[in-house]
Image: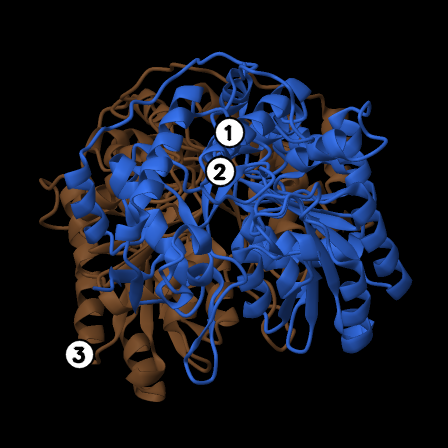
Amino acid sequence: MKEQTKRSWAEPYKIKMVELLKMTTASQRKKALQEAGYNTFLLKSEDVYIDLLTDSGTSAMSDNQWAGMMRGDEAYAGSRNFYHLDQVVKDVYGYKYMIPTHQGRGAENILSKVLIKKGDIIPGNMYFTTTRLHQELAGGRFEDIIIEEAHDPENEFPFKGNVDLEKLERLIKKYGAKKIPYVSIATSVNMAGGQPISMKNLKDVRALSKKHGIRVIHDMTRVAENAFFIQQREKGYDKKPVSAIVKEICSLTDGATMSAKKDALVNIGGFLAINDWNVFEEARNMVVIYEGLHTYGGLAGRDMEAMAIGIGESVQDDHIRARIGQVVYLGEKMIEYGIPIVKPIGGHGIFVNATKFLPHIPQDAFPAQTLAAEVYLDSGIRTMERGIVSAGRKANGENYYPKLELVRFTIPRRVYTQAHMDVIAESTLRVFERRSQIKGMEMIYEPKYLRFFQAKFKKKEA
Amino acid sequence: MHNYSVHMNTIIEPFKIKSVEPIHFNTEEQRIGILEKACYNPFLIHSDDVLIDLLTDSGTSAMSSNQWAGIMRGDESYAGSPSFFRFKDAVQDLTGMPEVIPTHQGRAAEKILFSIMGGKGKYFLSNTLFDTTRANIEFSGAEGIDLLCEEGKYPSIPAPFKGNMDIAALKKVIAEKGAEHIPLCIITITNNSGGGQPVSMQNIRDVKEVCTAHGIPMFIDACRFAENSYFIKLREKGYANTPAKEIAKEIFSYADGCTMSAKKDAFANIGGFLAMRDPALALQCRNLLVITEGFPTYGGLAGRDLEAIAIGLEEVLDEHYLHYRIRSIEYLTDKLIAVGVPVMQPAGGHAVYLDAKTFLSHIPVEQYPGQALAGALYVTGGVRGVEIGSLMFGKYDAEKKLTPAQMELVRLAIPRRVYTQSHIDYVSEVIIEVFNNRSKIRGLKITEEAPMLRHFTAKLQPIS
């Protein structure tokens, strides 16, 4: 990795507008958490001091983006913001055809319905909650082809988002290329801890898929963060700007789903992109039913404009360096305090290893869910479980038991300062110091789909 | 002026302009080329090439400075945002319904509702279902049945409540199909496809009574609830002194639930919601919501949009606004009636509807007179309207022959708080010019179409 001076990640922006935070007392937090059924998703954001629930839709927009909001053309059909966005997607990512959607899952829904037939297999570099669900609802089945290193939180392999090519080849052999509509490749693999895939690996996946006539579809929500890691870690890329690396990544895939609420620095919006005209046409016919006419896709014109501008900002080297620099700063503090986190430090957050943090709590008693609740109690910091609750159940009703039982401390883009990072590290340390007294939980309400959003828990008695 | 009018010579807007957006001018010659490039479908014209955009009143409103302040105040937390709680309070206050579910727009609310309640062998009864509503019902395998009152079917006959449901027909269909196959009855207020015509309070009460007797829940498609409420105030006995908000609350009090596109009567550029009384149904809805829309406290909307909707729901019930709104539509309608242009009468709440069948009596319905008229309005004056006729609602029978829609209309929807009286004067001049040259307009044929909601993307060409 490049040597960087301590303050090299200083923000390439200054603050133009602020949002006031409410401070809470320990007893207020205790009450709020009980009311939320010990699920951080169900807390009111007013009761939260530092909100690390997600980096999705929580970015601070730039003054340029806000200016774009004022330039929104709210015409139902043919808004100029649509044409701007269409051009930006071509210029920055290189995909031929684009359909806006109200957010990433809207794009996943449509793409899954268009490409997947009943009984299909979709190999991917680790599941993501909504992505896998849409694949399943369309009649397909997800198969994990990520390298084994990704499941080991301690392993410091630089590209833990890589695909195990042998796994992919075995799947193709077993089911035949006809049963595999596409390989689903995420850049910055979220569930693995924001871990990147290397360009070399992506090229190999591309070559293997091409040999069998299988498409590669790109879950590109954090492509710029992945590109930055390639620039920092992969041979031959240290002189290339992030924007060029992003374009190269996209060129190795046939289409993409994008939640612009992450990399692209907007509060709402997404798109699906595809190079094949026929798929595009089918998707365009479907988008009017679920999202909106294909020139707005369920978004206000102003949001398409903010997205077009945000995409441009997201691939600037200075921006990405500061973004990931802040995450690394927090991660290194936690490592210094002895807190077990996923290594190497990922792009969009710190993933605390709950299995190691609370070794006395079995996975059935939800160690990560418990830890998220405890961190909130300590200082009002809201984090998210990414373990057994998120993994949900298989079609036959059995729980998935994921190898990773993590709590995600996701850092919103351009929102919090270094002082906030210090508070987060110190608060986590306080919880770590009293970890042996913490007890597990049981689930008392479980929704059918995406249960982590709305499930409720109670504390186990001694 | 007829009985239902608001007596006022000059329409004074109860607001002043805070921010403007320039209009791009082009020539008739340029517009001929643009329309050809758009395959004679106004949906495919770039908005930059349109002078006066009357394609829809959906999402095209000018927000108030208060709404923009709400936009700045939007809390973008993924879960539990205070913007959501302000939104929920506003919806609960208006509808009295405890369960409030935000969606990215109205059709998403419908999609969720009909995924749960729809399915093969089921029938949804309505005064008139709108295009996306019908599409969502059919997509689930169910069938939608329109039971509009008789007077609603004739554009030139004025009547106060042409959006009413035909109660006798309602009873008959329930007897025929069996209440157990009818999961829901939906009243669309105002009736968009039927000319933006209102439904009376009495009719809503009557429908509710029939539904209750058969154990069928009643929902309201509430997109234009405020406009409908104001028509009740103006036209229905006993409501002249009732505030519009009280009327709206009474309407919702009869319903078991509602779907709402906040892009209409909440002045929002994006957003919608589902509200209902039944917590068990709400739980099912939220389970689907997280799949396609988003977490239940944002439903696929930015926090700022929830704020804008909450404020808009309050603003829209201001009677000075409603007075101006209804009177503006009537102003254009009266101008056209005065020179003999065939329009839907009386004026509706959000749009002027030209009767294309009479306007272009030389063009048969198989050649889409409404679409031809919409094209002519664009070429002559850069005015963009939308066909609501056989292109939007026509179907093919087993022999691939077109079963036409009941009416061939061109809707000129007036965005809320966007255009001034001089814009409207210009529009009337364009329509009158087209009317005077109507014999030169040719019919169209379809060259390309999608299996559902074809009017959005269909390509056409003139018949020589």
Cα distance between the residues tagged 3 and 2 = 51 Å
Q: Front-most of B391 and B339?
A: B339
Give the numbered dot on residue A211.
3
Q: Is residue A125 visible?
A: no
The reply to whether the C-beta atoms of the residues labelled 2 and 1 are less than 8 Å apart is yes
Q: Residue at (52%, 18%) from the top-left corner? A: B69
- Looking at the rendered image, the quarter that the N terminus of chain A falls into is top left
The reply to whether the C-beta atoms of the residues labelled 3 and 1 are less than 8 Å apart is no
Q: Is residue B58 left or right of residue A439?
A: left
Residue topped by disc 1: B416
Q: Is residue A114 visible?
A: yes
Residue topped by disc 2: B57
Q: Residue at (33%, 15%) from the top-left corner? A: A14
Amino acid on which the number 2 mark rests in the picture? Asp
Quarter of the image holding residue B450? bottom left
Cα distance between the residues tagged 3 and 1 = 56 Å
Cα distance between the residues tagged 2 and 1 = 7 Å
Mark 3 Cα shell of 10 Å, populated few (<14), some (14-19), many (≥20): few
User: Which chain does the brown colour mark?
Assistant: A
